[in-house]
Image (spheres, rainbow, N blue to C red):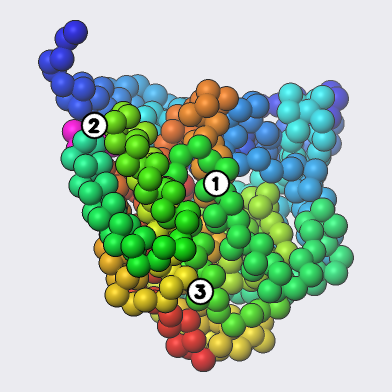
Amino acid sequence: MAGCEITDYMTVPGGISRITAGFEVHHENGSEKLVLRADPPAGTAIIETDRATEWSLLRYLNVETSIPVPRARYFDADGSQLGSPAIISEFIEGPSLTSVARAGTEERRRELSVLVVELAACVANTSIEGLPPQLGRPNSWDEYMDTQIAQWAETERLSNGSDPYMRYVGAWLDANRPAPAPLMLVHGDFQTPNILMPAEDEVSLIDWELTHIGDPREDLGWFRLVSMLTPPDVIGPDGEAFCARYRELTGLTAQVINPAVISYFTVMSSLRVFAGILGGATAMDEGQASSTAIAYTALIQSSVHRVWENIITGLGTKMDSGA
Amino acid sequence: MIVRPSIDKILRAISRDLEGEVLDAIDDQTVRVTVQMMAQLLDAMARRYANESEFIRDESSTVMSLATQIADKNPSALSLQDAIELARKAIDQNSIDHYEAVSEVLSCLAEVILASHSPADAQALQLLFKQRTENEIEIITDEFQPIGRA
């Protein structure tokens, strides 16, 4: 973008894993607003993810799918232009679904839950055939679940402090596996702050750094977990209706999609982010990293522990209740 | 060594100033989020400091009690037996090292109990996690909501 002028550069709070900033670029053809997502300085990231994989995915989603995703425009693969590997995308003007839900009435939240279910189904219904190979391809649902569940104990063993919830949850997940689902595209960080609303009934899904091929119920479970931690929960008040609509849109059965199963995945889906939290805590404890954001995850850890404990206590082995 | 005001009171005072006059003087949204995180962290650390010894003592006692019972019933649960042994040895170390060793006992205990499918033992295990969770929530408080996600 030689010869361009950058103005109104402003970092965006909330994107705690990457440096996120909006800015306006002025060039010979006019002006436009864009967003930068860049790797933070070494040792300060809460979760390590790969910008090249994210770039390939975004370009694929932009070109080959109808999922509402901001257009990815530029990529600095090695950081030679911008200081660290970075993606520049179209700026979506509009509040997050979190803000809209907080300001809205019960009726508005019900409308939002319809937008959420349609968006979730749109992601899950994406054909996985043409997706970038870097996303990986599990051989089967059983193998995928085996790997995911084993990581709970493994993650705890790799951290330098003992977190007994990890092995407790891992053992519980293993003993209470739900009915299998087809392997589908999973956004990986499907939550209301990552859903922007450029218009009243329009959404745009951002933050694709944790995307993978896996069990689509992970996105629903993770959505619920974040909603529980940072209300309001737009699914919670009518979980049955949400599941019914999701089943309609995806063709999945009631045995596969029901509120109890989503609770199971509320627990299971937290591993990816939780592994990052424990990794960050370990790095900080060993003096390899240091930041307020990493220290702060200790509080989030406790908050998530409570959600896990409540679900495990309440759910027992009722995973087939919606069948 | 100066011990008054106590550490928790000092941390709370800093936290209040951060959330008050410091935050009021900051316009940058990202910096504001960091300062709010700092204030929440300092508050939580003040509560942890005020309760840590009691929480560690109580949790350690209940975990070791159930673990010993389960280990006696399951002599083949070697990882649990080893963890108990290490926790007993760690009792003379500093309280954090001892708590870490007891936490390892709890991890092993969870794996043994969930593999044994005993409802009574599973319930006793749930109580241990409930106690631990309650202590963690006492530190972050019931009202805790993560900063910076909107």
Query: Percent from the top left, x then y, of residue A307?
Result: 38, 60
Please indicate whether residue A211 sits to the left or right of residue B103 in the image.
right
Query: Label 2 belongs to which residue?
Result: B49
Q: Is residue A41 above or below residue A134?
A: above
Q: Which circle's residue, 3 or 1, is located before the other in the chain?
A: 1
Element at label 1? helix
Can marks 2 and 1 be said to lie on one chain?
no
Kind of residue sitting beneath label 2: Tyr
Q: Chain of mark 1?
A: A
Q: Nearer the viewer, residue A126 or A170?
A: A170
The Cα–Cα distance between marks 2 and 1, rounded to whole angstroms, is 27 Å
Query: Which residue appears farthest toward the top when viewing the image?
Result: B1
Quadrant location of the N terminus of chain A? top right
Q: Chain of mark 3?
A: A
The crowd level at tag 3 (other Cα within 10 Å; few <14, some 14-19, many 20+) is few
**Mark 2 or mark 3, whichever is nearer to me:** 3
Q: Which residues are magenta?
A: B43-51
Pointer 3 and pointer 1: residues touching (CB < 8 Å)? Answer: no
Q: Is residue B93 above or below residue B113?
A: above
- Magenta segment, prevailing SS (helix, strand or loop): helix
**Mark 2 or mark 1, whichever is nearer to me:** 1
Query: Label 1 belongs to which residue?
Result: A157
Q: What is the number of the mark on residue A175?
A: 3
